Amino acid sequence: MNVIYKFAETDDEFEQAKALFAEYANSLDIDLSFQNFSKELESIRSQYDKPTGALLLVYKAGSLAGCAGIRRLDHDIAELKRMYVRPDHRGLSLGRELLERAIEKAALLGYKKIRLDTLSSMTKARNLYETFGFKPIDAYYFNPIADTIYMERVI
């Protein structure tokens, strides 16, 4: 299996990630406007690039298969956002590797904790997060979606 993991550096890579973020959002079948999603797409590079963030991409056989973003929440807390593996690439442990590398990168950026939110319906994702030591926490931002679960892990 020809798989390459890399952090987005070029404008083209951030544009590819932007398209993947939109694909991810469409797959959720919920409105992300409460998260200012359109602004997030417009400012993807400033949120998910050095020195406070990172955007990990995974390619399989030359095709973009998934991504995971790290961005700053607080001086010592990162947030994992938009972790997504395209449906035709699932079951290959790409998500597991994305998560592991994202956590490592957050630590290298100096963060002490990493947070995320997920939906109760995303059972496989929740199980993966729990496997990596994420624990449920209270909400850390407003979210009108009732089945949202917030999680955190000490790095």
Image (tube, rainbow, N blue to C red):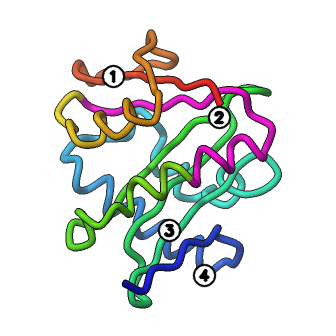
| Image mark for residue 78 | 2
The answer to the question of whether label 1 and label 2 lie on touching residues, with beta carbons closer than 8 A, is: no
Residue closest to the eye, 26 or 96:
96
User: Of label 4 and label 1, which has the lower sequence position?
Assistant: 4
Residue at x 21%, y 66% (from the top left corner) = 87
Query: Spatial distance from mark 3 to mark 1, Cα to Cα?
Result: 24 Å
Query: Spatial distance from mark 4 to mark 1, Cα to Cα?
Result: 33 Å
Say what secondary structure mark 1 lies in: strand
Say what secondary structure mark 3 lies in: helix
In front of the other: label 3 or label 1? 1
Q: Which of the 4 quarters of the picture holds residue 122?
A: top left
Query: Spatial distance from mark 2 to mark 4, Cα to Cα?
Result: 25 Å
User: Of label 1 and label 2, which has the lower sequence position?
Assistant: 2
Asked if residue 74 is positioned above or below residue 13 in the image, the reply reads: above
Q: Which of the 4 quarters of the picture holds residue 33?
A: top left
Query: Spatial distance from mark 1 to mark 2, Cα to Cα?
Result: 17 Å
Residue closest to the eye, 69 or 33:
69
Residue at which label 3 appears: 17
Q: For the magenta stretch, what is the residue range? A: 101-119
| Image mark for residue 149 | 1
